[in-house]
Image (cartoon, rainbow, N blue to C red):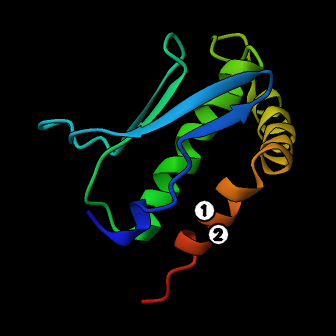
Amino acid sequence: MSDAYKGLPKRVRIGAFWFDVEVIPPYEGTGEFGHMNVGSQMIRVSPDQRPENLANTFIHEVIHAIHWANGLLDEKSDEEDYTIAAANGLCAFVQDNPEAMAWFVKHATVKA
């Protein structure tokens, strides 16, 4: 596992909810890099990703959790609902989790 996994937050606040973050074995044959589970309030990422892909996977799963926390995991929501929730949710995420965002920025901006 690369050094990018060091400092990966163990827990983040999303809206009124706390999500644990863990590294899990790769999904065999599915090609998935991560997963967000609302039942267990977990964000999981697969090991051995490059730093920029790990950062992308992490924020991708955070956005899924933001949508869930805002009640947008249904067919009735439209693009504007998702966009408003993502913008508001990401702002709150940054405010509630500055260490997680510092980790994200460090690994999302890796130079080739």
Residue depicted at 42% across the width and 67% down the height:
4
Callout 2, which amino acid?
Val
Residue 83 lies in quadrant? top right
User: Measured from the top left, where is residue 23 in percent x and y?
Assistant: 35, 43
Residue 31 lies in quadrant? top left
Callout 1, which amino acid?
Phe
Determine which residue is flagged by label 2: 105
The vertical placement of 86 against 48, above or below, is above
User: For residue 42, which numbered disc appears in the image?
Assistant: none
Secondary element at tag 1:
helix
Question: CA–CA distance between discs 1 and 2?
Answer: 4 Å
Residue depicted at 29% across the width and 38% down the height:
24
Determine which residue is flagged by label 1: 104
Which quarter of the rendered picture does the N terminus lie within? bottom left
Drawn side of residue 51 relative to residue 93, left or right: left
Which quarter of the rendered picture does the C terminus lie within? bottom left
Mark 2 crowdedness (10 Å alpha carbons): few <14, some 14-19, many ≥20: few
